[in-house]
Amino acid sequence: MAHHSIGPSVDRASLILASASPRRLSLLAQIGIVPDGVLASEIDESPLPREKPRAHAIRLAQQKAEATYRLRQDQPPSYLLAADTVVGVGARILPKAETEAQARRCLSLLAGRGHRVFTAISLITPEGVHKCRCVETRVAFKPLSQAEIEAYLASDEWRGKAGGYAIQGLAAAFVTKLVGSFSSVVGLPLAETANLLSGSGYQVIQRWPVVSQVNS
């Protein structure tokens, strides 16, 4: 009979995810991390004049972490994890599509060409140390017919997504090449996030389930 238990118990500060994204919660759960809370703060996500996609992702992730840090100043020290994903074509930042017209423009621009997806992760440790990493992934789309674009728009999967698409959904049918981190394109680079947390004292693998085989 198999018994499931959690690895050695460890004392730890809590982990707060500074993002309301259900995708990021799901990605963290995939590597055995369940935040103790979710607290997303509202910030202005408008690009600065001449701001490049990588710099934009880093700035927003840091601002999200800092805004949540300020909201929790009267709470016990915690690990605060924020992230932001930006799709760039050259120096151009594509929006997080909120209208069908925006999504159509994004898909028309991405069709038949390569683009880059930048996901920045920002961590504030219980000691107040700020750390940041940015992961770049290159993605290429096949040429898209008008029928394919219209069918994808009808699915509504594009809504609120950077660049107007969600790679973990129907848009996977458009991807001909991916170089880098798939999870980063979804919204959180898992290897880099685990390394950042582990390197800051947050136990990751110690929380993975341990399955022991016991004969009964």
Image: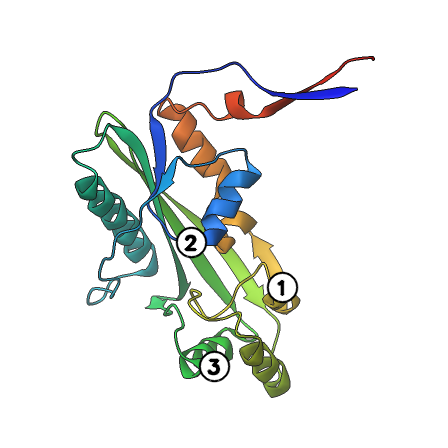
The label number, if any, that marks residue 104 in the structure image: 3
Of callouts 2 and 3, which one flags the residue occurring earlier in the amino acid sequence? Answer: 2
* Residue situated furthest bottom in the rendering: 146
Q: Locate residue 161, reporting x and y percent.
A: 44, 65
SS of the residue under disc 2: loop
* Residue in the foreground of this view, choosing between 68 and 46: 68
User: In the drawing, what numbered circle is on residue 172?
Assistant: 1
Q: How is the image coloured?
A: rainbow
Left or right: where 186 falls relative to 125: right
Report if residue 14 is visible in the image.
yes
Q: Which residue occupies 34% across, 66% down?
A: 91
Rendered location of residue 158, percent (x, y): 49, 71
Residue at the disc numbered 2: 21
Give whichever of discs 2 and 1 has the lower sequence position: 2
**Residue 181 visible in the displayed image:** no
The x and y percentages for residue 95 are 36, 70
Q: Tell me the mark number nearer the camera, choosing from 2 and 3.
A: 2
Q: Are marks 2 and 3 in contact (CB under 8 Å)?
A: no
Give the quarter of the figure containing the N terminus. Answer: top right
Q: Give the Cα distance between marks 2 and 3.
A: 23 Å
Q: Nearer the viewer, residue 155 or 114?
A: 155
